[in-house]
Image (tube, helix red, strand yellow):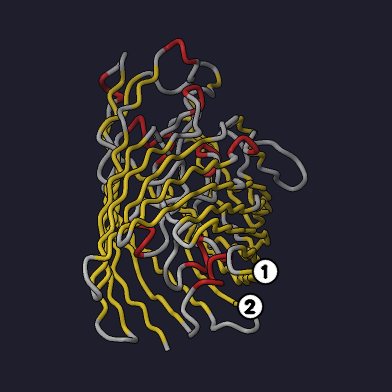
Amino acid sequence: MKKKIALLAAMGVMAAGTAYGAAFRIPEQSINAVALSNAYIAHTEGADTSYYNPANMSWQEDRWQIEVSASYINLPSIDYTDANDSSRDGSSKTENIVIPMFHAVSPDFNNLRFGFSFVVPFGLSKRWNDDYPSNFSEDFTLNVFEANPTFSYKFCDNFSIGGGLRIMHTNNNTVKTSGDDALTIGGNPVLITRDMDGDATELGYNLAMTYKPTKDWALAATYRSRVTMGLSGDAEINYSIYGTPIAAPYDGSVKLDIATPAILTLSTAYTFDKTTVELTWDRSYWSKLNKLEFVFDGTTPDLLLDKDWNNSDAYRIGITHKCTDKFTAMLGFGYDETPIPDKNLGFELPDSNALLYSIGGRYKMNDKLELGGAYLYDYKKTRKISADDGNARIVGKFENAGAHVLTLGAIYKF
């Protein structure tokens, strides 16, 4: 089955978020995480603890807990205005995406707990129809799924560790580019079209620990390992000038390694009676993404792309308040840095620093069933690229980027 994955080249990393986290990372993977802008590590409640901080499974209710939820993500159109040539202006298409999420936590077995999560930690969808932007990013859709079996062990009443296996899979990727304005022959622009397919399944790990100096105060740290996705599949490449083929098309194998970032998170939470305040910092180690090298039949005739992304930091605060025995309200705010330097910014992922605002709540229907919902708004700042930044394709600005995330789900305990 032919999938178009040429823009993976222009883009730069395949593992990432529907483009509402830093780069294409999707950090918010549960009702609580969306409601708290992902300030959700030291103080976790429910089945999603298995994903966000497995060490905290030690302090969950001593019975099975399951959360099933889904997020609807709306990515509004992004406007590009070129500083030198208005014919290069354009707007991306609006994207609507739904991602499923599942979490489970076991009862206690002599201070040992087990958990399991299924999430979509990275992803992206971006399409442009206008002539100039579509040369580099006509269509790009990326899917990365993760199964995360976890465990926790409580050494004493105030200290627990946890960890697990990251089983990451990517498929159904769609990427299409249809040009390269830097390549000419005899003064004529050469049109390059690339179609590639490929999938991969790779392994990583995650670690966690929580220390509680008092019953109301928690300190936590988590670490998710870097996972390199080794794609292999088939590719077709065609070259033409004004519709006339100028070289024999390539039709053969292709290989590509893409590193997803390691993520370190530190968090602290304190509970004041019925209100819990949590502060969280995390770093995504995108600097391992130096370049993308497409290997065709043991050679590299087409693509070797420098990315040189930077490590990026995120700062978040979340507030959880138990309004009544049945209803819990949540608020969150966050600031995400983009890892993409000005010189390598592209139309496939015109990312920028972002502010996050979120709200949500859970309602306890009875002793076994709880319903929840959350909304998050990701506001991307205007990104300007000047001639001095050394970007070969973009001199202008991106505006109106962002994301709306609506999450609904249910928690069942038995």
Q: Residue at x 63, y 70 (%)?
A: 154
Q: What's the CA distance linking mark 1 and mark 2?
A: 8 Å
Farthest residue to the top: give it: 388
What is the number of the mark on residue 111? 2
Q: Amino acid at mark 1?
A: Phe
Instruction: Give the number of marks.
Output: 2
Residue 131 at x, y = what percent? 32, 33
- The answer to whether the residues at label 1 and label 2 have Cβ atoms under 8 Å apart is yes
In the rendered image, which residue does mark 1 sit on?
Answer: 155
Q: Earlier in the sequence, mark 1 or mark 2?
A: 2
Position of 256 with respect to 179 (left or right) is: right
Pick whichever, 240 or 4, lies toward us: 4
Q: Where the C terminus falls, by quadrant?
A: bottom left
Residue 33 at x, y = what percent? 39, 58
Q: Residue at x 56, y 31 (%)?
A: 310
Q: Secondary structure at mark 1?
A: strand
Q: Label 1: how many residues lie within 10 Å, few (<14), some (14-19) or many (20+)?
A: few
